[in-house]
Amino acid sequence: MPLTKEDQPSCPVEKTLSIIGKKWAVLIIRDLLHGKKRFGELLISLTGISPRTLSARLDELVRNGVIKKKIFREIPLHVEYRLTKRGEDLHLILDQMSAWGAKQ
């Protein structure tokens, strides 16, 4: 559940971390920077994540407006995830994290 306005941190860094700071969230966003993905594709690319954890992180990111979930009502049923504009705005942050990590 997204934080209420009263519960949200006032520090911008804390606000950002409250949305993308949980384990796997940034890696999900990283994978979606390359385009929409289905649940199974994300599960394969994120080695070590459980389906339950992936589902929970995706739901949190959807609730926080970072990603959009599209359900295709066909047989077999499938779901695609993609970044919203708000999620795409995180591209620069991830680029900086990547550059910093490459120097280490």
Image (cartoon, rainbow, N blue to C red):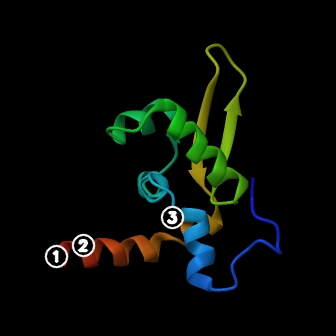
Quadrant position of the C terminus in the picture = bottom left
Mark 3: which amino acid?
Answer: Gly
Where residue 97 sits in the image (x, y, percent)?
A: 34, 74
Label 2 residue SS: helix
Label 1 residue SS: loop
Where residue 90 sits in the image (x, y, percent)?
A: 52, 71
Mark 2: which amino acid?
Answer: Gly
Q: Nearer the viewer, residue 94 or 74?
A: 94
Q: Please give left or right for residue 24 compared with residue 101 in the image.
A: right
Q: Is residue 36 above or below residue 44?
A: below
- What residue is at 27 percent from the left and 78 percent from the top? 100
- The reply to whether callout 2 and callout 1 are in contact (CB within 8 Å) is yes
- What residue is at 46 percent from the left and 30 percent from the top? 40
- Identify residue for label 3: 21
Q: Is residue 54 above or below residue 83?
A: above
- Identify residue for label 1: 104
Where residue 72 sits in the image (x, y, percent)?
A: 68, 28
Label 2 to label 1, Cα distance in Å?
5 Å
Where residue 52 sits in the image (x, y, percent)?
A: 54, 32
The disc at residue 101 is: 2
Q: Please give left or right for residue 60 compared with residue 88 in the image.
A: right
Question: Callout 3: 10 Å neighbours few (<14), some, many (20+)?
Answer: few
The disc at residue 71 is: none
Label 3 to label 2, Cα distance in Å?
17 Å
Q: Nearer the viewer, residue 71 or 66?
A: 66
- What residue is at 69 percent from the left and 59 percent from the top? 64
- What residue is at 65 percent from the left and 13 percent from the top? 75
Q: Nearer the viewer, residue 35 or 39?
A: 39
